[in-house]
Image (spheres, rainbow, N blue to C red):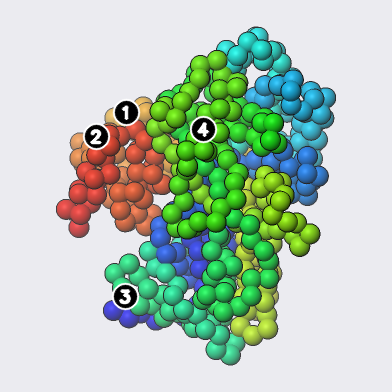
């Protein structure tokens, strides 16, 4: 089978930056094709700490520009996707052997006031002997600080951007690798290969390299160009254990090596702990946690929590590689945690235009995409204004078509209202649907009036109707896509869940 496509922009890479750029560009009327060799968000973009945050610790590196940009984006994203992004309160126990209290308080004051803040409460000092967050901690921790940031379902954030791109006319091709590209005059000719070995030829006016950790490799091996920027690959790993506390706050723990680790309430019954920051020189397609990282995370949380954990308590783990941009003056001796999380856009206009995205963090993806399209659109004769700051992501139009504070502050009211609309749904399932799909629940539940109409419960909490929805509307092609990226049902299921779901999907084809 052979297919030919014409477009303004070919984007290679289906992580958060590629999907974000596809959404922005398609919304400005540019024709877009995005290809991803695996599933959407199957690598770095689903392996984050799942936070929308300014980056409190970057203040120590005097990276005020990045922190301010991220804090502004934090507010924009909370409003645009209140279903998958929500406020989260963090507690930092004060360890007398670490940063002095006055320094932490000063940093949090700056964090509170570096950008306009409407949705989240400011920071405060707390007495851990009286605060609920002090209960699981060792008695030596009596003082702490609390501040606010946001939590995000990172994999769903990528998918929602891809859905928005498609609804604005973009073509999204998953399981489709770009195996060759060639500049021909003022155009790019690319050859793509699908999972079933079909070939897709794409003729594009502009090429975007949004391949994340593969950006330099893609330039060198596929485009036959120079990277221009030095990428430092940093592995971040996380572990998940049975929940260590019952209150809704997260923790931010300091470590003598300068790194910080979060302990975050996760999926109701669990605690997510991470991340590590170590240089990575292995296969970027096969990134896994190692024993030393598990020991590091366990040791750090055991310094703070009264009830210790061991590697045997780890129920699930995941790892990702972040491509960080190094300045010329930096060297490999610098701590991985000190390398900037900001991004760089390299635009080559010598012939057919080529934009390469280096670095970035999930919080600033929308701004990165906006700047990228602002940069490339004029080269394609397009001068439409940026639009995503005032637009909801799919399902985020909880109380009106435009982003608003109410959708964030009154999300529980939305859940109560849909509970009246779907009284037959079990409360926990309804809440999960509300958080995953927002107003798009109506599409998932169309023409269904009881639980029997949802079809077989293939694994606990996962019904055939949802699987079919994810296949039809969200590019899910296998059990792993559904259990670990579109949902986290895999965490709540038996060890046979992936096999059982894949067998059901194969039989349904």
Q: What element carries label 3?
A: loop
- Dot 2 corresponds to which residue? 451
Foreground label between 3 and 4: 4
Give the side of residue 322 with respect to residue 339, left or right.
Answer: left
Nearer the viewer's eye, disc 2 or disc 4? 4
The residue positioned 41% from the left and 36% from the top of the image is 316
Measure the C-alpha gap from mark 2 to mark 4: 44 Å
Which numbered marker is on residue 198?
3
> Does the image show residue 343?
no
* Nearer the camera: disc 3 or disc 1: 3
3D distance between C-alphas at marks 4 and 1: 39 Å
Q: Do the residues labelled 3 and 4 touch (CB within 8 Å)?
A: no
The front one of 497 and 173 is: 497
The numbered mark, 4 or 1, whose residue comes first in the sequence reads 4
Q: Nearer the viewer, residue 417 or 229?
A: 229
Q: Do the residues labelled 3 and 1 touch (CB within 8 Å)?
A: no
Residue 221 in the image, given as x and y percentages of width and height: 52, 75
Identify the image quadrant of the N terminus: bottom left
Q: Which label number is shown at residue 295?
A: 4
Q: Residue 447 versus residue 33: which sits nearer the camera?
A: 33
Q: Earlier in the sequence, mark 2 or mark 1?
A: 1
- As helix, strand or loop, the secondary structure at mark 2 comes to helix
Q: Can residue 506 be seen in this view?
A: yes
Asked if marks 2 and 1 touch (Cβ < 8 Å), the reply is yes
Give residue 426's mark.
1
At x 20%, y 36%, the residue is 452
For marks 3 and 2, the one nearer the N-term is 3
Rendered location of residue 296, percent (x, y): 55, 33
Distance, label 2 to label 1, CA atoms, is 9 Å
Q: Position of residue 204 (x, y in %)?
A: 52, 80
Say few, some or many: other residues with alpha carbon within 10 Å of mark 1 (under 14 / 14 to 19 / 20 or more): few
């Amino acid at each position: 089978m052979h297919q030919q496509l014409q477009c303004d922009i070919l984007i290679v890479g289906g992580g958060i930056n590629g999907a974000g750029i596809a959404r922005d560009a398609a919304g400005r009327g540019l024709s877009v094709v995005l290809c991803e060799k695996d599933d959407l968000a199957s690598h770095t973009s689903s392996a984050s700490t799942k936070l929308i945050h300014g980056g409190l610790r970057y203040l120590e590196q005097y990276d005020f520009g990045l922190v301010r940009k991220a804090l502004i984006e934090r507010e924009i994203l909370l409003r645009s996707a209140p279903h998958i992004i929500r406020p989260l309160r963090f507690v930092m126990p004060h360890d007398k052997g670490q940063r002095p209290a006055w320094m932490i308080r000063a940093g949090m004051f700056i964090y509170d006031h570096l950008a306009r803040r409407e949705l989240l409460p400011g920071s405060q000092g707390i007495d851990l002997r009286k605060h609920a967050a002090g209960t699981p901690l060792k008695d030596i921790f009596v003082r702490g600080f609390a501040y606010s940031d946001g939590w995000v379902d990172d994999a769903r954030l990528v998918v929602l951007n891809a859905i928005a791109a498609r609804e604005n006319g973009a073509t999204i091709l998953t399981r489709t690798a770009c195996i060759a590209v060639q500049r021909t005059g003022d155009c790019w000719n690319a050859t793509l290969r699908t999972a079933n070995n079909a070939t897709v030829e794409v003729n594009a006016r502009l090429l975007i390299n949004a391949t994340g950790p593969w950006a330099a490799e893609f330039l060198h091996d596929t485009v036959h160009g120079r990277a221009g920027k030095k990428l430092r690959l940093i592995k971040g790993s996380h572990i998940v254990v049975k929940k260590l506390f019952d209150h809704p706050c997260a923790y931010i723990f300091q470590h003598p090596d300068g790194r910080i680790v979060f302990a975050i309430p996760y999926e109701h019954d669990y605690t997510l702990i991470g991340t590590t920051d170590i240089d990575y020189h292995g296969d970027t397609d096969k990134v896994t946690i190692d024993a030393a990282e598990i020991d590091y995370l366990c040791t750090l949380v055991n310094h703070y929590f009264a009830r210790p954990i061991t590697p045997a308590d780890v129920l699930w783990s995941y790892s990702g590689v972040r491509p960080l941009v190094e300045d010329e003056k930096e060297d490999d001796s610098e701590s991985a945690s000190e390398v900037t999380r900001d991004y760089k856009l390299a635009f080559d206009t010598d012939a057919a235009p080529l934009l390469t995205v280096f670095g970035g963090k999930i919080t600033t993806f929308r701004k990165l995409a906006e700047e990228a399209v602002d940069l490339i659109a004029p080269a394609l004769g397009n001068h439409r204004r940026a639009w995503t700051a005032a637009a909801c992501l799919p399902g985020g139009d909880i109380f009106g078509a435009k982003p608003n504070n109410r959708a964030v502050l009154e999300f529980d009211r939305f859940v109560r209202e849909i509970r009246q609309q779907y009284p037959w749904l079990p409360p926990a399932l309804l809440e999960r649907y509300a958080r995953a799909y927002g107003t798009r629940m109506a599409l998932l539940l169309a023409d269904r009036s009881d639980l029997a109409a949802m079809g077989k419960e293939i694994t606990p909490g996962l019904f055939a109707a949802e699987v079919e929805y994810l296949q039809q509307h969200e590019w899910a092609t296998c059990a792993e896509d559904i259990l670990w990226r579109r949902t986290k049902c895999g965490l709540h299921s038996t060890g046979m869940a992936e096999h059982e779901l894949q067998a059901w999907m194969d039989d349904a084809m």
